[in-house]
């Protein structure tokens, strides 16, 4: 199983109960498929940068979960079929963590290399001899 993050944008016309039911159904799909939901962060109603289906606002929610890959396909299929979901984006966070580790390792290697360069003694011809 891999770790995923999914940001879901829902139409603002839904009431709070309908939004909760919708997100509960997504959680149930994940757990029924053998995954586990680690965090659901409700970001609330926000103004959109541009109109989507004549809506100027949307309700944002972030899901963090681990699940098998075929379950992601099913979740995305169901989100596409649901008219209340305006947009969604699923990202595999395992790759993100590996890239962050790789980036920090490269940064650390560069810092060590620059330290070695600055700690070298000056060449013999540059010394002040009296």
Image (tube, rainbow, N blue to C red):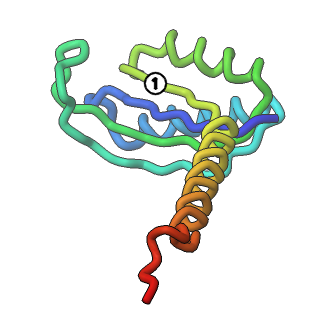
Left or right: where does residue 23 sit relative to residue 86? right
Residue occupying the far bottom of the picture:
130
Task: Name the residue nearer the viewer: 122 or 124.
Answer: 124
Where, quadrant-wise, is the C terminus in this rendering? bottom left
Residue occupying the far front of the picture:
130
Left or right: where does residue 80 sit relative to residue 27? left
Seen in the picture, residue 7 relative to 129 is either above or below; the reply is above
Q: In which quarter of the image is residue 68?
A: top right
Residue, x 51% and y 71% (percent of image)? 122
Q: Position of residue 123 (x, y in %)?
A: 54, 67
Q: Position of residue 117 (x, y in %)?
A: 55, 62
Residue, x 44% and y 70% (percent of image)? 126
Q: Position of residue 50 (x, y in %)?
A: 17, 22
Left or right: where does residue 13 sit relative to residue 103? left
What residue would you read off at disc 1?
88
Q: Quadrant of residue 94?
A: top right
Where, quadrant-wise, is the N terminus in this rendering? top right
Residue, x 45% and y 31% (percent of image)? 8
Q: Is disc 1 placed on a helix, strand or loop? A: strand
Q: Where is residue 31 in the image (x, y as percent from the top left)?
A: 76, 37
Residue, x 46% and y 24% (percent of image)? 88
Task: Name the residue nearer the viewer: 120 or 115.
Answer: 120
Task: Name the residue nearer the viewer: 92 or 88.
Answer: 92
Seen in the picture, residue 58 relative to 98 is either above or below; the reply is above
Circle 1: is it few (<14), some (14-19), or many (20+) Cα within 10 Å? some
Seen in the picture, residue 27 relative to 56 is either above or below; the reply is below
For the image, the number of numbered tags is: 1
């Amino acid at each position: 199983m891999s770790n995923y993050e999914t940001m879901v944008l829902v139409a603002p016309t839904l009431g709070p109960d309908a939004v909760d039911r919708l997100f509960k159904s997504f959680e149930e799909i994940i757990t029924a498929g053998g995954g586990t939901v680690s965090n659901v962060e409700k970001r609330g109603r926000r103004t959109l940068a541009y109109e989507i289906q004549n809506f100027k606002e949307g309700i944002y929610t972030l899901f963090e979960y681990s699940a098998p890959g075929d379950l992601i396909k099913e979740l995305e299929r169901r989100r596409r079929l649901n008219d209340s979901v305006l947009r969604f984006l699923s990202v595999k966070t395992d790759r993100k963590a590996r890239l962050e580790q790789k980036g920090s390792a490269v940064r650390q290697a560069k810092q060590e290399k620059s330290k070695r360069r600055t700690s070298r003694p000056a060449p013999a011809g540059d010394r002040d001899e009296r």
